[in-house]
Amino acid sequence: MTTDKVSRGKPVRAFLSDVINVPHFILRLNALILILLSGVHPDGYSRTVTKLGEPQAFSKLMAMLKQDKIYSGPCFGFVNEANDDKLAKTDEDIAFYVYAIREQHGDGCPGDPNTSPVIARFRIARSTGRIEWLDSVNDKWKPYSMFLKQRAK
């Protein structure tokens, strides 16, 4: 009877199919795990797994502002507030570099030289480099693109 089932091939084929598919499943699973751990997205772009340093974050922000012709010139100052305990309230805050843009007064810049008001705040994600803008009216961080839309109004 065993010989008969083997000769028809159905049980043997089913058994071989199970044996052959298990290693392929394991290989596929291992490949998926390696892809996830490597930080490479299946669509082909790479997720940044190394943290952005403060100089690179500041350079990225400055490049974006210069490209969009915003806050350039000698009458603007930039302050890194990332380590300010008043602003770093949560783990999420620690994951970002926070920069305040201040008006500079005096030395050829109009305004009271005893004041330097904050006119905008940006934060840059340490892990991805994503730039966000603080919408001070709603007290919410929004994508940089929303900042540009807001300025265009």
Image: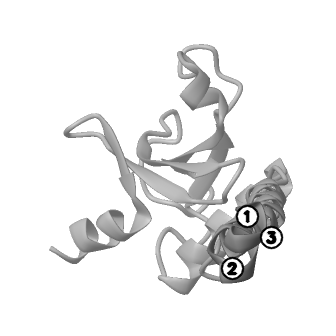
Q: Give whichever of 114, 31 is nearer the camera.
A: 31
> Marks 3 and 1, Cα distance to the nearest angstrom?
9 Å
Mark 3 or 2 closer to N-term? 2
> Marks 3 and 2, Cα distance to the nearest angstrom?
16 Å
Image spot of residue 69 (x, y percent): 49, 82
Mark 2 or 1 closer to N-term? 2
SS type, badge 1: helix
SS type, badge 3: helix
Q: Residue 69, can we see it?
A: yes
Image spot of residue 64 (x, y percent): 58, 75
Instruction: Check disc 2 and give the amino acid type.
Output: Gly
Read off the residue under disc 2.
9
**Image depth: mark 2 or mark 1 in front:** 2
What residue is shown at x 67% (from left), y 57% (from top)? 128
Q: Are marks 3 and 1 in contact (CB under 8 Å)?
A: no
Q: Give whichever of 92, 146 is nearer the camera.
A: 92
**Image depth: mark 3 or mark 2 in front:** 2
Q: Is residue 34 shown above or below 123? A: below
Position of 15 with respect to 90 (left or right) is right
Position of 3 with respect to 91 (left or right) is right
Q: Quadrant of residue 94?
A: top right
SS type, badge 2: loop
Image spot of residue 151 (x, y percent): 26, 70
Quarter of the image with the N terminus is bottom right
